[in-house]
Amino acid sequence: MTMSDKIGKFGANGLIFIFACGMMTLARWRLDSDAWFILNCGRYVVENGVIPHTEFATMHEGLHYVMEQWLTAVIFWKIYNNFGADGLITFACFVGIILMWIYYKLCLYVSASNQKISLLLSLVICIIISPFIVTRPQIFSSLLLLIEIFLLEKYVRERKIWTLCALPVISAIFINLHSALWVMLIIVIMPVIAESLISKLKHSPDIPLLPLILATLGIILAGFVNPYGSEAMLFLFTSYAPEIHKNIIEVQATTIDGGYGTFYFAFSAMTIVTYSKKIMPIRYFFLTFGLMLLGFYAYRNMFQFFVLGTFTLAYAYKDLQPFNQKFNIKHKLFVPLFLICAVEIYMILSNPEYSIWEMHLPIKILTSCAIIFLLCFIFFYRREGKLFSAELPILRRKPLIALGVFQWIILSSVIYFNFPATDYEPHKPALDFLLKNERAENIILWTGFNSGSYAEFRGVKTYFDARPEIFAISNNHKKDIVTEYFNLKHGQLDYREFFSRYNFTHILVTTEDIIPYLLISNDENYRLLFEYDFSNHKDHGRIFEVVNRNV
C-alpha cells in the first residue's frame, strides 16, 4: 500500500470516527441535571477526606446515607475542578466513544470479522445511544458491563479461564463507581450459566460450568470492597419506593406513544423477527430478551438494551455482505442533501448571536479534524485503483459526495446545537440573585426535584433534590420525605400545614411544581423576590422570601 493509499484510508476512517464523535457531542453542551449533586458529593469527599454515611447537603439532619457513586463523583469533581464543565462533558463524550469502539470490536468478534455488518450496526447504535451519553455514572457502568460480556464471549468461544479472572476486579471497580447497577454484573453472567446448564442436560458439547460459578462467587465477594458493604450491593432493592416510580418518568414503564418509546417498540419488534428466522445461541436469547424486558419496565433501561443486547444482531447477520452491489443512484438525489447542509450552515452564519470563535474548544477541534480527514479522503482515497479526482464522471464520485455531504450535515448540526456558550444550569440566575443578597449558611431553601441539586452545589441547604432514593425511608432510616414532597406537589398536602413544619427562609418554586407555584404566588405570607425563565422559556421560576414563618 502506497503512502497515498494510506493517507486516503486514514481520511476515510477518520470521517467515520468523527461521525461517532459528532453524535456524542450533538445537542449536549450542558451538564446533565444530576451532575450537580454528583459534583457536590465528589467535592465533599475530596475536601473532607471521608466518605459520608450521613447525608450532608440538605436541611434534613441525621439521614442515613449511601453515596452509591462516590468514586464517579470524585472523578467528575477532579475533572470539573481542573477543566471546568467543558472538560467534564468532553470526558463523558470520550467515554462514549470508547464504549462504541468496544461495541464495534465485540460485533466484529461474534460476526467472524464481518467488518461491514459490525461497522453498520455500530454506527446505528451510536446514533441511538448518543442522547444517553451524559455526565452520569451510567457511562462507566455500561462500559464495564460491555467489557464483561466481551470476556464471557471469549471464554465461551476459546475456553480460556483467564478471561474470567478479570470479572472480580471489574466488580470491585463497579461497586464503587455505580452501586445502583452493580447487580447487573450477575444478571449478565446468568445467560451463559443457563446455556452451560442446558447443554449439560442435553449431553451436548458444553461450556465448563465450574469456572462460571467461581467467577460469579468472585463477583459477589469483590462487591464487598466498598465503604458501605452489603448496603451498596443491595442499593437497587432498598431504593424502590412507589412514589418514585409513579412520578419520575425515567423509571416508569416505556410506552409506545411518542419519542423513544415508539422507536424502542419498533426496534424490539425487528429484533424478535430476526431471532425468529435465525438459529441463535441460548445465551443470546436470554441476554437480549432479558434486557429488552428491562427496557419495557423502565425508560432508562433502554440504554442498557441497546448497548448490551444488540451486538447479537451482528452474529445473526454475520454471513450478510451489504453494499456489494453497485449503487444505481442518480446524482440529482444528492440535491436535497446539499440543500439541508446549506440551510444548516446558513442558520449558523446568519444568527448574530453565533460566532465561530465562541464555539466550545472540543467542537473547534472536532471541526478542524473533520476538515483534515475530508481533505485526505478527497485527494488521496482510491477505489478500484482510481483516484477520486475532478476528471472522473460525477456518478463515479457518488460515494465521495454522499459521505462528504452527510458528514457536513452532522457537523453543521453539532455546531448549530452547541453554541453560543451556556452557563450549563437553568437555575443559575436564581441562585446568583439569592446569594448576592444572602449568605449561603443563612438560607434554608425549599426546592423541588430539579432545582435542588444546583442550589446544594452552591452551598445552600435545601429540602429536596434529584436523588429521590435518599429521601425514601428504606434508605434514610428516618423519614419518608419523598412521599411528603410528591403529596405537596400534587396538592394532596396543604401547603400551609407543610411549610409550618419547617423553618424555611426562602422558597424556590417553578412551573414543574405547578400547585405550590400557584398557591404560594397568591399568598401574602410569601414575598416575591425574583423571577426567571428556563428550558428555552417554556418553564418559569420564582424565589419568595418567607415573611411570616409561623404560618
Image (cartoon, rainbow, N blue to C red):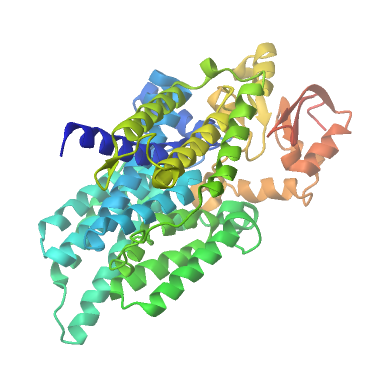
Residue 415 in sight from this viewpoint: yes
Q: Position of residue 288 (x, y in %)?
A: 38, 67
Closer-to-camera residue (57/3): 3
Closer-to-camera residue (47/1): 1
Q: Is residue 322 left or right of residue 473?
A: left
Q: Is residue 134 left or right of residue 341?
A: left
In the image, residue 174 sits, relative to residue 62, either above or below, namely below
Image quadrant in which you'd find residue 218? bottom left
Q: Residue at x 39, y 21 (%)?
A: 47
Q: Residue at x 48, y 57 (%)?
A: 302
Closer-to-camera residue (297/310): 310
In the image, residue 133 sits, relative to residue 421, either above or below, namely below
In the image, residue 195 sits, relative to residue 255, either above or below, namely below
Residue 478 in sight from this viewpoint: no
Name the quarter where the C terminus is drawn.
Answer: top right
Q: Position of residue 52 (x, y in %)?
A: 40, 34
Image quadrant in which you'd find residue 19? top left
In the image, residue 489 sits, relative to residue 256, either above or below, namely above
Q: Position of residue 148 (x, y in %)?
A: 26, 55
Closer-to-camera residue (173/150): 150
Q: Is residue 57 left or right of residue 52?
A: right
Q: Residue at x 38, y 25 (%)?
A: 79
Q: Position of residue 293 (x, y in %)?
A: 47, 68
